[in-house]
Image: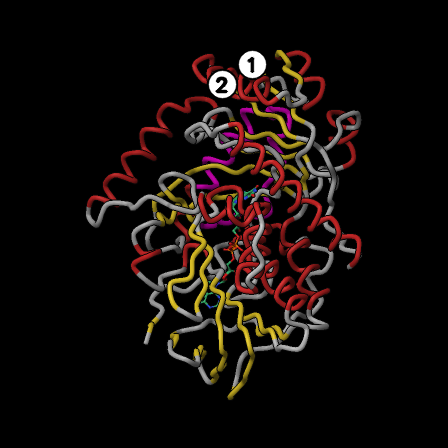
Amino acid sequence: MGVIKCLPQVDGDLGWYLTAANVKQSIGRPLKGQQRADIVVLGAGFTGLSAAQRLKELYPNQTIAVVEALDVGQGTSGRNAGFIIDLPHNVDAQENTPEQDAHIRRLNAFAIERLQNWREQFQIDCLWHQAGKYLVAKETANLAGLDAFEASLQKRQDAYQRFKRDALAARLGTDYYQEGIFTPGNILMNPAALVRGIALGLQEHIDFYTRSPIIHIEYGDEIKLHTVGGVLHAKKMVQCTSSFTDVSALTKNTIAPVFTYGSLTDPLPEHLWQKHFHHIQPWGVTSAHPAGTTVRWTPDRRILVRNILEFNPSQHSSEQQRQQAWQQHRASFEARFPFLKQVDFQYTWGGVLAVTMNYQSVFAQPQDNVYVICGCNGVGVAKGTYLGYYMAEMMHGNNSEALEFIRQTSQPTKVPPEPFRSLGAKWRIHKEQQTAGLDI
Ligand SMILES: Cc1cc2nc3c(=O)[nH]c(=O)nc-3n(C[C@H](O)[C@H](O)[C@H](O)COP(=O)(O)OP(=O)(O)OC[C@H]3O[C@@H](n4cnc5c(N)ncnc54)[C@H](O)[C@@H]3O)c2cc1C
């Protein structure tokens, strides 16, 4: 019997969820009484929904259920910065071979197309736009991150433009950054609206149990997932619970839960928009430094700030931690937009990244009828979408080059046991935040 010790909770004011056009539409019902499914997918993020949809296609006559602790869109899939990243790029990851890069690129393109198709099919209003992405640096020391990125783009012959301060300022509406590299393929959106829209579309053929934290799981020929007052009996389970996954030694020593935080403004008042942004297209920037700040200017005229990395095994944030995050967000925001000091953040929230040491994910079958995906690091919108699809393919016995690549590159290295895990993770994060300087 697996007792689940750590459950997700709502960490603050979830800006994307609360401003999503579909927030009032109801998805699923709480899991109460005795329920059955042939296959249960635990976790309704991008990974779980992608797995569930492909399973339904492959097993049209079987009952597929999705169980989610919160409302759909309140989990990390609905709390992230809303970048669907097309390029193989982790700012501080080890370099891939050209073949690996080509595979990741194809898989990201596949995920973007899959999400795009759902967006069209289910008519999801989620501010989806192909804005591309700027990788930016303020500190001279961090220009090295841009140089390394540029070298990888040149090697792969990817399209890009590199801008100095003035040209960048004309595009972003802030002259904060020294330089930036623009790549065109990235998508920006409201992630809570997108993940909710997908679930709303899928619930015609898939059973959704929401606001249903699973508190323990009984493994065996039949899997029993228990909520308070309910049990779901299933023949197979696909666990897509990200950092909350704790099913076996396989995942236990591979994932480090790292908290990060976002803040979002209300739409800028008309006079400020007219004065500073009327000629600026919506954009998204990530930092050339791994601990730097992500910023977005959205199509509905809001500004998002995301930063802070905290090793946080509790996987929950306190009001005090969110207040500290808010203070850092204000400092980052006012440094970039000194002319917007009177604009408040209406929403500040935290969310947990499932980080692995070598950036590879867990994609595994620890038991005959149990399948696990977790550890998508900071690129889970695209990665979770393709891993979910290919997990269903693997369960069905479908082989492909893409699946083989995923299997070979899903070997996360072990993190050291406690207390070394905590000490090592804290030291690494501290060091990175110190060297980021004004890029935070
Ligand atoms: C602030 C922030 C910004 C980010 N920005 C980006 C970005 O711009 N682009 C990007 O690609 N990635 C980004 N990420 C990472 C990305 O959000 C994750 O990689 C992604 O959400 C992983 O998706 P998932 O479906 O695997 O897991 P999740 O989205 O975490 O989904 C797992 C679900 O399982 C549910 N669950 C867990 N335990 C239980 C239980 N016991 N019972 C029932 N349900 C349970 C959770 O409630 C959750 O909804 C960001 C993350 C954060 C925190």
In depth, the one of 372 and 134 nearer the eye is 372
Q: Which mark is residue 74?
A: none
Most extreme residue toward the left is 419
**Compared with residue 87, is residue 36 higher up or lower down, i.e. above or below?**
below
> Is any part of residue 353 visible from this angle?
no
The residue to which callout 1 is attached is: 178
User: Residue shown at 69%/66% (left/top)?
Assistant: 202
**Relative to 82, does residue 179 appear above or below in the rendering?**
above
- Magenta-drawn segment: 325-352
In this rendering, does residue 227 appear at all? Answer: yes
**Looking at the picture, how far across and down is residue 264, in whole percent?**
60, 43
Using the numbered discs, state the Cα–Cα distance from disc 1 to disc 2 in whole angstroms. 16 Å
Q: Position of residue 396 (x, y in %)?
A: 57, 64
Judged by depth in the image, the label closer to the viewer, 1 or 2, is: 2
Find out whether residue 350 is within the magenta segment. yes
Q: Quadrant of residue 172?
A: top right
Q: Amino acid at mark 2?
A: Ala
The N terminus lies in quadrant? bottom left
Q: Earlier in the sequence, mark 1 or mark 2?
A: 2
Q: Quadrant of residue 211?
A: bottom right
Residue drawn at 64 percent across, 25 percent down: 339
Q: Determine whether the beta carbon of the residue marked 1 sits less than 8 angstroms from the nearest atom of ligand 1.
A: no
- Give me the disc on residue 148: 2
- Binning the other alpha carbons within 10 Å of mark 1 as few (below 14), some (14 to 19) or many (20 upward) gives some
* Mark 2: secondary structure: helix
Q: Residue furthest bottom?
A: 34
